[in-house]
Amino acid sequence: MQPFTRDVIHIIQNIPPGNVLTYGMVAALAGHPGAARQVARILHSMSEKHDLPWHRVINAAGRISLRPSGGHDIQKHRLESEGVRFDRSGRVDFQECLWDVPAMEDI
DNA sequence: CCACTGACTACTT
DNA sequence: CAAGTAGCCAGTG
């Protein structure tokens, strides 16, 4: 497994309840700015094995990227149960929910 | 090793 | 706001 993959998993496991991160930010924190697609891919294939809170990762627009048939509602429900609010267009409030990453070393 | 596939993003029409 | 474009790079076969 690549260091990038390991870091991405590690970062996602550290997102506290009620907070979210974007794919791009996770990629950047893992040392690969612009590798957002890979984060999505890792979530898709490793979330079960590594027990990841995959629902706390959303796209840069603040919306859920899953297709309605791919768990979109499940993700929304899990976030709402953690206190994440969605506005009428289905976007989360970054000001309140975006994870304020402590420091690179703490992750 | 090559080709293909993405739960992406930023930028430009 | 919608649609197109060009990067992105780890899995998978």
Image (tube, coloured by chain):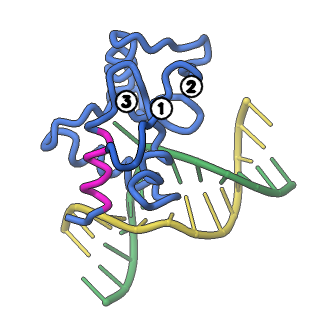
Chain colours: A blue, B green, C yellow
**Mark 3, secondary structure of its residue:** helix
Amino acid type assigned to the residue bearing label 2 in the image: Phe
Q: Is residue A82 magenta?
A: no
Q: Residue at x 32, y 61 (%)?
A: A4
Count residues near mark 2 (Cα–Cα under 10 Å), then give few for <14, some for 14-19, many for 20+.
Answer: some
Amino acid type assigned to the residue bearing label 1 in the image: Asp
Count residues near mark 3 (Cα–Cα under 10 Å), then give few for <14, some for 14-19, many for 20+.
Answer: many
Marks 2 and 3, how far apart at CA: 12 Å
Mark 2 vs mark 3: which is more N-terminal? 3
**Mark 1, secondary structure of its residue:** loop
> Above or below — where is C3 with respect to A30?
above
Along the horizontal axis of the image, is A50 left or right of C2? left
Q: Which residues are magenta?
A: A4-12
Q: Look at mark 3 in the image and give the residue it sits on.
A: A56
Q: Residue at x 60, y 11 (%)?
A: A88
| Chain ID of residue with mark 1 | A
Q: Look at mark 2 in the image and give the residue it sits on.
A: A94
Q: Look at mark 1 in the image and give the residue it sits on.
A: A100
Q: Residue at x 38, y 55 (%)?
A: A30
CB atoms at circles 1 and 3 under 8 Å apart?
A: no
Point out residue A39 in the picture as x, y percentages from the top left corner. Answer: 38, 50
Point out residue A29 in the picture as x, y percentages from the top left corner. Answer: 43, 51
Task: Tell me which secondary structure the magenta stretch mostly adopts.
Answer: helix
In this rendering, do the residues under marks 2 and 3 share a single chain? yes
Residue closer to the observer: A91 or B13: A91
